Image: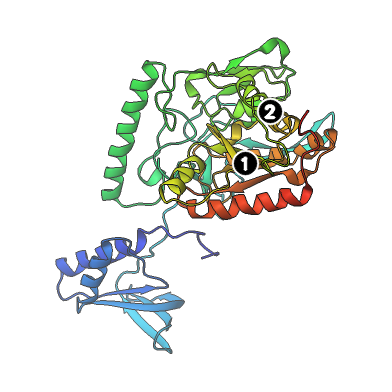
Amino acid sequence: DKEHLPYCSSVCCATSLKQAQYIREANPDAGAFIIYKDMRTPGLYENFYKQMQDDPGVFLIKGEIQSISEEEDGTVTVTFENKLLGGTNVVKADLLVLATGMVTNMVPEGKDPNNLTDEFIGEIVTKQTDSGPVDELVPEPIALHLKYRQGPEMPHLRWGFPDSHFICFPYETRRTGIYAAGAVRHPMNAAEAMMDGAGAALKAIQCVELTSEGKAVHPRAGDMTFPEFRLESCTQCRRCTVECPFGVLDEDEKGTPQEHPYRCRRCGTCMGACPQRIINFKDYNIEMMSAMMRDLNVPGEDELFPYIVGFICENDAYPAFDMAGINRLQLPPNFRLIRLRCLGGMNLAWISDALSKGVDGVVLIGCKFGDDYQCHFVKGSQMANERLGKVQETLDRLMLESDRVAQYQLAINEYDKLPEILNEFMERVKELGANPYKGF
């Protein structure tokens, strides 16, 4: 309902039915009218809905309220349009109850869930900079008052509910060690909240244990590496501090990154963001990937053309390749893949290295992004897509066509699309011809 809430609470309908049942049990002679626009009772609560339909003292009517008036005797008269049978009906009741939707208390009083800023609740303030006026979000501290560069609260996904809607890890938030549960995470009833709280508590125990051993939590649980910074070469561009999805990096007054290592999820997004290539992991770094590019045995045009290299996200895309193999799907033999922790760790230098070696095309395959994102590291795939907008400059410098590089979104269960994706890209590269750097 655009005039009320942009989402369904999934709780109000069942609560209304429950209260009607309480009234009927307390006074069998009482009656209850439930006038609704839509009746939604998820899961097994559908059985409860059917049970209440069989109660002769409960009247369920699909209608649109037209007016409400209070009478002199204290009763309430409700006039509504019957949407199923047509016409106008009037109900005289002793008590009127409004089943309003559940709203998170992370939305401050006076703000509308329909119109919130992205990620953080706050005010847009225009600041004057050397480059002119810039609109900047100033987040409002509401409950947690965290000392994060990105804001004092947990980022919200939409409507004020925190961004913990990972496909496989529902309690995780973008604040390591803080878990959202119950109605904080999304509207739910008390029974669901109890189970939710138990799940979040188990995740918190896991976090404490792994962190005490210097290990990462979701999704690279057990990883003991940390990003290492060669700060003497840092240009204070702030890309790493801005793009880190988990607030690992703050910055000093000069813009030099300051690390909080135990917030880190080891995704490598900071490594992909850094234009100076000063951020690396011991077992996952810029030089390691560049060495892979240099060691490629690129065949000649008359041997295997086009020769394609793919950078593949290990969380969804790589398992999709496994499923394609298990199902014996035919994939092009002239395709080589390199697994990345996250597509957000994709550094444009690797594309330059691959094309300089003579590779005919480079394809990036990662998680879906947008409103229904499925990235395990929140925005990795989306940030890789944004960086590809800058790849044109690199290709122009190499005198190559930008169509030699493409990115595709792939869910883990869309393995059957891989032959189509790769063959389509192969045909595109064939039209461009062989890489002129081939053989050098």
Residue at left 41%, top 60%? 100
Amino acid, disc 2: Arg
The answer to whether residue 39 of the structure is visible from this angle is yes
Quarter of the image containing the C terminus? top right
Please state which of residues 316 and 81 is positioned toward the viewer in this rendering: 316
Q: Position of residue 436 (x, y in %)?
A: 81, 37
Residue kind at label 1, given as amino acid type: Leu
Q: Position of residue 335 (x, y in %)?
A: 60, 41
Q: Which mark is residue 145?
A: none
Depth check, front residue: 290 or 224: 290
Front label number (2 vs 1): 1
Q: Position of residue 20 (x, y in %)?
A: 25, 68
* Neighbour tally class for label 1: few under 14, some 14-19, many 20 plus, Cα within 10 Å: many
Say which quarter of the image contains residue 211: top left
Q: Say how many tags the image has.
A: 2
The outermost residue toward the top is 232
- Residue 13 to residue 363: above or below: below
Q: Is residue 81 above or below residue 210?
A: below
Neighbourhood count class around disc 2 (C-alpha, 10 Å): few under 14, some 14–19, many 20 upward: some
Mark 2 and mark 1 in contact? Answer it, CB < 8 Å.
Answer: no
Which secondary structure lies at badge 1?
strand
Q: Which residue is under mark 2?
A: 239
Any part of residue 241 in sight:
no
Q: Is residue 279 left or right of residue 213?
A: right
Q: Residue furthest front?
A: 302
Task: Give the image quarter of residue 287.
Answer: top right
Q: Secondary structure at mark 2?
A: helix
Q: Which mark is residue 364?
A: 1
Question: x and y percent of residue 176 in the render?
Answer: 45, 28
Q: Residue shown at 34%/29% (left/top)?
A: 204
Q: Earlier in the sequence, mark 2 or mark 1?
A: 2
